[in-house]
Amino acid sequence: MSPSSSSPLHLAVALDGAGWHPAAWRDPVARPRELLTAAYWSDLVAEAERGLLDFVTIEDALGLQSSHVTEPDRRTDQVRGRLDAVLIAARVAPLTSHIGLVPTVVATHTEPFHISKAIATLDYVSTGRAGVRVQVSARASEAAHFGRRTVPPFRFEDLESPSVRELGVELFDEAADYVEVVRRLWDSWEDDAEIRDETTGRFIDRDKLHYIDFEGRHFSVKGPSITPRPPQGQPLVTALAHETGTGAPFRLVGRSADLGYVTPHDAEQARAVVAAVRVAQDAAGRATEPLHLFGDLVVFLDDDAAVAVARRERLDSLTGHPYTSDARIFTGTPVQLADLLQNLGQAGLSGFRLRPAVIGHDLPAITRGLVPELQRRGAFRESYEADTLRGLLGLARPANRYAATTV
Amino acid sequence: MSKPLKQIHLAAHFPGVNNTTVWSDPKAGSHIEFRSFAHFARTAERAKFDFLFLAEGLRLREQGGKIYDLDVVGRPDTFTILTALAAVTEHLGLTGTINSTFNEPYEVARQFASLDHLSGGRAAWNVVTSWDAFTGENFRRGGFLPQEERYSRAREFLTTAHELFDSWHGDEIVADQESGTFLRDAKAGAFVHKGQHFDIEGQFNVPRSPQGRPVVFQAGDSDEGREFAASHADAIFSRYSTLAEGQAFYTDVKGRLARHGRSRDQLLILPAATFVLADTDAEAQERAREVRRQQVSGATAIKHLEFVWNRDLSAYDPDGPLPDIDPDLGEHTIARGRAQVRMYRDPLATAREWRERAAANNWSIRDLVIETGNRQSFVGSPATVAETIDSFVQADAADGFILVPHITPGGLDGFADTVVPLLQERGVFRTEYEGTTLRDHLGLAHPDASAPGERVAS
């Protein structure tokens, strides 16, 4: 089930270092020495909240950034080093009041028990604004940071080889199990489990706490969580899905996510991607559940299109080659971008996650240029209409899977 | 010349998942909502405390095969709540208990380094170990660690984490927009660790944090735990809050430091301490008795007796006499997920002694548990409590205390308002924060202040 195509668009921004262009940190507005400070991140999220955006995502990885998909690059001319994304989100949560906070976590090398309580706690400290973006890691170098599993090294050219395809399927299927565990743990306490009954001396009604007893190929988890059910019941689960030969990323979104990020480059591709994810959603038996699909776009945004082009060319000249991305790269004005978003929206996307090429420039261009333009068209909210992230996205607070239902 | 007065260190333990915490009191608030944590942290900072302390348990406790329901149950994720608290405080240290058994060094190191960055240098790590398969059932590899290897893993975990913290020196990020050099050194963060428990290598991805490394706490009390503290820790969270026990522990642990090439001021000893305040000492004693009755309900008393008896005693009346039957000496099966059960080494002797004391005093089961259980460390008027705390510290029973209030979140307010000013008047507690990092508050040197392999006395 997709949200109605006539509904206003939803907007998120993807925060990563100084921006998505590898030379973003060299732009005069960038603050490259402050990327590891609380002040930097709280300024960015405050700006996004001023623009009434639905949420921010925060990139992360369990290794240094690299320009190579599969291995470290040892470069010294790009931003290297980062902070834990869940903790950045936690740090800005008390300073904001409406915007959703969606950090990235890597399922491949972490414990679903730890992440479940971390995101539940993010939901508590933000009073209902937490989400999570689940990612897998196929990098041998990152596996070596943990020493718990062996991931064979491979080259970018080998991405479609049978062994690498098999690895991808395994990692995405494991991530689906991971999300299942995280979600069961969120539900492992019923909402009214805490009773404080002085007569019997009981703090909780333990019949309302549940073992999750998950047993899968990669791990078993007993439960219950040590953290009570979070304010949203189920914080938002999101994942980025590219089209692959195996379809594994679409299966993850179809089976496990409330919101998927996709990377179509035009309306036709958007329709095809939406259809493919809906097939995966049906196959997972979730056809009637809401599943948002957001288009990812890199944006160079200026009031004058020529200025945006010149800015992109200047950054490309600093790196010595044109910037490329899995997502479509938009270069132009707020009016042009609003046209594009509405066009893609009609193809079945309910919102967009914009990746600012230079955060210090393109984030304010989104909040102060694009947002007013969409508002003029009646395509974006005039004020926050809900207090939780699920609420902003029109998603109901889910019933607890373990609660006894009264018929 | 008289010895200069020692400055007292004070910390606040967020009320825990145990029966010290009184949830039934009308003043008791939420144990999970952020506003409770924010209230508690702000009180501690208003009182110029060194740090806030959070405990952790990674599996809900069970007794008789069922989830234990008489105490507060449920807590937040340690890293997430501490980092959020960094947003509502400016100076307060943030100490989290993190298990070295069910975590991996790369992830924990980046979480502590991130907390240290995001708090401007206020992170501390209370390193704990566990081995039980019970807790392991919540994690990928289950109960993989033999009990005798838990400290060996903890030591190697901490050593490995230090290698990761030290893989960045702090001068790598140049970020020269003109020349295009972001990093001075392509190998920043490079590490290799080949050991018994960890075989890892690569590049750490969090650059050097303000404190270099988080402050390290240790809480175990065994001989191995004390050695671990003497060799690796900056502070000990101990359980000895009486004068005599405190002095014995203090002497023992401080005496171990020289063997590890460390000076006596490089390890702080900070016992947990409970307190009850009232206008007069007599009122405080009366109030303390009431609090103990709140802490030990009839149902709680039966459950505590089961720790010793290792049997289901639910048929017994808490207001009646102690059981005639003897404890079950088989494998301890009654309670899981708590350390308390290991305190009774000889259950038969304990049971005999308790029966005798109960008979002599005409105590019921509940009376017995109240009387033998933890009495509050400091009970009295603010003047009495301030004087006692000061005298304990000056007499080398401690370097300060980690206070454990019994009410969430307001249980620290009275101490902050009445005892702290008296300690300040005595000249033994700060009136303003003098530094910005937790190392500054604790008087610990920055790790970079000493040459590699060498420690410098502050």
Image (cartoon, rainbow, N blue to C red):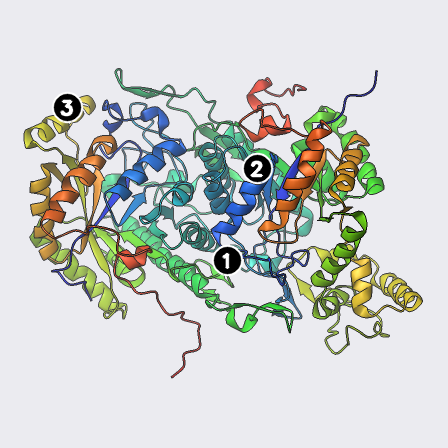
Q: Nearer the viewer, mark 3 or mark 1?
A: 1
Q: Position of residue B423 (x, y in %)?
A: 71, 33
Kind of residue at badge 2: Arg
Q: Which mark is residue A91?
A: none
Q: Position of residue B301 (x, y in %)?
A: 74, 67
Residue A47 relative to residue B201: left or right: left
Kind of residue at badge 3: Arg
Chain letter behind tag 3: A
Residue B283 relative to residue A238: left or right: right
Q: Earlier in the sequence, mark 3 or mark 1?
A: 1
Q: Estimate how packed mark 2 is, as few (under 14), some (14 to 19) or many (20 or more) residues with alpha carbons within 10 Å.
A: some
Regarding residue A377, the answer to whether it shows in the image is yes
- Disc 2/disc 3 C-alpha distance (Å): 51 Å
Q: Position of residue A4 (x, y in %)?
A: 15, 63
Q: Nearer the viewer, residue B66 or B283?
A: B283
Q: Position of residue A159 (x, y in %)?
A: 25, 45
Residue A93 relative to residue A253: left or right: right
Residue A178 relative to residue B336: left or right: left
Q: Secondary structure at mark 1?
A: loop
Q: Which residue is mark 1?
A: A227
Q: Which residue is mark 2?
A: B46
Q: Secondary structure at mark 2?
A: helix
Residue at figure coordinates x 24%, y 28% from the top left: A24
Residue at figure coordinates x 65%, y 69% from the top left: A201
* Residue furthest to the front: B279
Q: Which quadrant: the C terminus of chain B?
A: top right
Whether B322 is drawn above or below B267: the answer is below
The reply to whether discs 2 and 1 touch (Cβ–Cβ < 8 Å) is: no
Q: Nearer the viewer, residue A97 or B120?
A: A97
Kind of residue at badge 1: Thr
- Disc 3/disc 1 C-alpha distance (Å): 49 Å
